Image (tube, coloured by chain):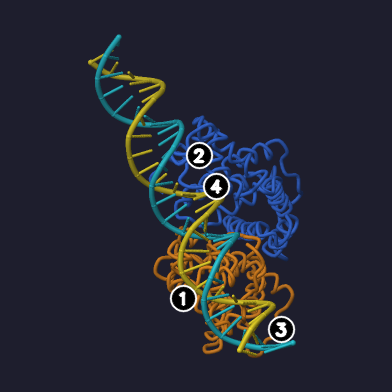
Chain colours: A blue, B orange, C cyan, D yellow
Amino acid sequence: MTAVPLPGELTLVDDRARRILDAAVRLAETGGFSAVRLRDVAQASGVALGTVYKRFRSKEDLLVGVLSLELVALRERFAAEPLQGATRLERLVQCFAALTETLCARPHLGRAVIRSAATGENALAERLQRFHTALMELIVGAIRGREDGPVSAIELERLTVLEDVWFSRLVGWTGELYGPELVVEQVARAARLLYGAEGDV
Amino acid sequence: MTAVPLPGELTLVDDRARRILDAAVRLAETGGFSAVRLRDVAQASGVALGTVYKRFRSKEDLLVGVLSLELVALRERFAAEPLQGATRLERLVQCFAALTETLCARPHLGRAVIRSAATGENALAERLQRFHTALMELIVGAIRGREDGPVSAIELERLTVLEDVWFSRLVGWTGELYGPELVVEQVARAARLLYGAEGDV
DNA sequence: CCGTGGAATGAAACATGTTCTAGGGGTGTA
DNA sequence: TACACCCCTAGAACATGTTTCATTCCACGG
C-alpha cells in the first residue's frame, strides 16, 4: 500500500505491467478472484512478486486495472457497430446491454473485477475515477444518434442514475443473486421510469 | 465456508453470537474493516476462534451481520419520529437521509459493513437478501403518510431504483470519494427525476 | 572501460483469514 | 452412576496478501 504509479494508458507501454495484467486475466478467467494468487500472477507473467507490487498497489488494484483493458474492447465494439435504436432511450438500453454483455462474457473475470471495484479501497479511487469518466464519455458518445442534439444536462443526470443502478445490479450479479439478463432488465426498467411518460427522443 | 446457521432474529437469542457481533462492532467502530481481526473479535467476546466461525461463515459475513443490528435501530428511529414530509417524495428523501445518517454515523463501522456487503460473496447472499427485504418493508412503512393510499407498483419500482442508487453511492462513500451529504444528494436527485414532472402525492 | 544508481529478482518474513484437531465439560439417557 | 453426544476451547496448521532485504542486473554518464 505504498506509493505507486498508475497504469492507464501506461498499461500499453509498460511491457511488464501488460504481462502482469494479462496473466491476471488468464487466471481470473478460469478461477475467479481467488484463483488470482499474486505469486501465480508473478510466475505466469515472468516477473518477481515485488515487481507486481511495484506496478499495482494490491490485488484489487490489479484486477481493477483490467477495466482499462475492457474499456479498449468496449470502444472498439461501439466503433465497429454503433447502436441502432431509434430513440435515445432505446440506444441507452442497448448500450448498457452491451456493457453488461462484455463484462459478463467471462463471468469469473467479470465477478473478480466487480468485486475488486466494489471493495471501496481508498487506493482504488483514482483508478476507478478514471474508468468512470472514460465510461461516461463512452456512453455519451455511443447513445448519441445521427441527428439528435447534444446530451442535455438532465440526461446526464439520468445517465448517472443508470450507472448507479447498473453498478448495484452488477454487484448483485457478482453475488450470484441473478443473471446478466436481470442486470440489463433492471437498468432498462429504470431507464423507462426516468425517461417517463414524457416520451423520449 | 462450510454450512452455518444464520443469525437474524437469532442474533437476539444466541448469547454468544450477540457478544461476537458486539465485539466486532466495537472493533470496527474505531479501526474499520482491517481492525476487525477475528482473533481479536474472539478474544474480545470471550469465545474461541472456532466459535466465531461456527456462527459466521467469514469476516464479511460477520460484518454484514451487523446490518441486522442497524435494522433494529432504524425501526426504532422511524417508530419514534415518523417522517413528516408533506409529499411522499419528500418523505422518501427524508427516509434515505435517515438511513444514510444512521449508517454513516460511525464511519469506520459503516464503511466496514458496506465493504463487506459489496464483496458479493456468494455466501452472503442469503443474509443480504433478508436485509434487503426487511429494509424494503421498513421504507415502505416509513414513507406511507397518514392518509395516502398504498404504495403502488410503480412506486415500488422507483424505490428499487433508489435503493440501487443509494447502494452505489454508499460504495462511493466507502472509497472516500465523497461524503454522506453527497450520497443523500444523489438519491434525492434520482428521486426527483423518477417522480418527475408529473407531480407527486 | 569502469563505476554508479535505480530497478528487478529470489527468498524470507509477517499478518491474518480460515481450517483442523485433540481434548474438556456439560447434559440428557439407560 | 456411567455413558454418549454435542458444543466449546485452545492452539496448531495452512494459505495467501503484503512487506522487506540482500543481491544481481542493466543502462548510462564519465
Disc 4: which residue: A64
Disc 1: which residue: B45
SS class of the residue under badge 3?
loop
Q: Are marks 4 and 1 on the same chain?
A: no
Three-letter code, disc 1: Ser
- The crowding category of the residue bearing disc 2, from other C-alpha atoms within 10 Å (few below 14, some 14 to 19, many at least 20), is some
- Distance, label 3 to label 4, CA atoms, is 43 Å
- Distance, label 4 to label 2, CA atoms, is 11 Å
Task: Confirm whether residue B197 shows in the render.
Answer: no
> Which callout, 4 or 2, points to the residue nearer the camera?
4
Task: Confirm whether residue A85 shows in the render.
Answer: yes
Marks 4 and 2, the one that precedes in the sequence: 2
- Distance, label 4 to label 1, CA atoms, is 36 Å
> Which callout, 3 or 1, points to the residue nearer the camera?
1
Residues at badges 4 and 1 in contact (C-beta under 8 Å)? no
SS class of the residue under badge 1?
helix
> Which callout, 3 or 4, points to the residue nearer the camera?
4
Three-letter code, disc 2: Gly
Task: Determine the chain carrying the residue at label 4.
Answer: A
Q: Are marks 1 and 2 on the same chain?
A: no
- The crowding category of the residue bearing disc 3, from other C-alpha atoms within 10 Å (few below 14, some 14 to 19, many at least 20), is few
x and y, in percent, of residue B190 in the image? 59, 66
Q: Quadrant of residue B52?
A: bottom right
Disc 2: which residue: A8
x and y, in percent, of residue B34 in the image? 45, 61
